[in-house]
Image (cartoon, rainbow, N blue to C red):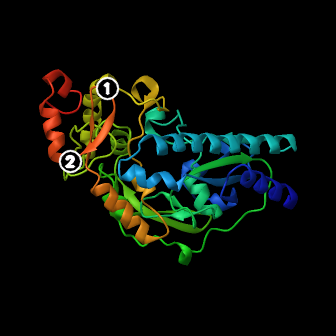
Amino acid sequence: MEKITGRATDLAKCYGASAVGIVTTEMLAGGPPSVDLAYVLPNAKSAISFAVPLNQDYIESWFSKQSHADHLHNNIQTNVIASGISLELANYLNQKGYPSIPLTANTAYRTDSKNGRFDEIPPISHRYLAVRSGVGFFGLSGNVLTQNDGAAIILGSVVTEAQLIATDPIPGEINYCDDCRLCKAACASGFIDGHEKVTMTMGGMDFSYSKKRHHSRCDYVCGGFAGLHNSGKWSTWSPARFNIPDKDEAFYPALVNAVGPYLKRARTALNVYNVLMPGDRVELTCGNCQLICHPDKKIRKKRYKLLTESGVIVENPDGSREAVSPEEAKKHLAAMDPKTRALYEEV
């Protein structure tokens, strides 16, 4: 097992992972349902967790609204790489005689919960495996942070019947998250509580992060249905400015109301395919809580400054988008005929 564990770890790193960890079923005991490895492989004994870094060179141009496509393309490609590493790892272990299941990096949901895939419960939680195995640690946002790349990573996992050799979680004193709350401040949806925390226990160890509000908040804003911060001074990459409700129960009606205009607006060439979204495609217009986290607090602050001074996005008749001042955006919308304006805000 030492040889197999080492080679599986090396494979993941050779193919693009920056951090790799191993977790066993015993280490996950007492955890939430999404760490039950038997859900995908009845005789599972362990799982490999790994992180693939996003390209940090594109993050500042994302926050400053100089380029939407660079990070979007990199995000899609990094997800594909993470899913590909999972497939290669599982194939390697299967060929060695250990039944293994690869897990896609994103947009996979259980169908046997109360609301099926709309509950957005993953078959296995990459995040929980990552923190328990030492790939990273929880930041306040609930995103997994790694020592070198912050939260700018895509996670992947493989579940296997091999009894691989476990790795330890990262000691708490190495976790550089200082509850600066810039993740909360950079989120236009109000998804992160930022004060109250939730704690889970896995294998006798406690892991904590901020309580979240309903996940439809993230769907609504990160998916581009709306994007104007309640200050009115900055937005995500979405040109839409429909109401972002204060109460969780108001989000589903708001989402339904925004679907029609969403489908009628021009779309960028790059989309994430997700069966939960209208037309099975969704734009990526935010992700700020993930991208703002960096080991260096000065860089976090710089990114937040870029975001809050970047203005708001408007969409031109040819479908191109640009950042303008809040005042210019209002003039831009006021110049539209009512039918066109209704694609972006309540008329």
User: In the rendered view, does 218 fall on the left or right side of 234?
Assistant: right
Question: Residue 67, located in which quarter of the rendered image?
Answer: top left
Percent of width and height locating residue 322: 30, 40
Amino acid carrying label 1: it is Asp
The residue wearing badge 2 is 325
Q: Quadrant of residue 330?
A: top left
Say above or below: 45 vs 284: below
Where is residue 188? Give x, y as percent.
29, 50
Q: Say which amino acid is labelled 2.
A: Ser
Give the Cα distance between marks 2 and 1. Answer: 20 Å
Residue at figure coordinates x 57%, y 56% from the top left: 128
> Which of these two is toward me, 105 or 120?
105
Residue positioned 55% across, 52% down in the render:
55
Q: Nearer the viewer, residue 73 or 26?
A: 73
Question: At 52% from the left edge and 33% from the top edge, which residue is drawn?
Answer: 111
Dots 2, 1 in contact, CB < 8 A: no
Residue beneath label 1, please?
Answer: 318
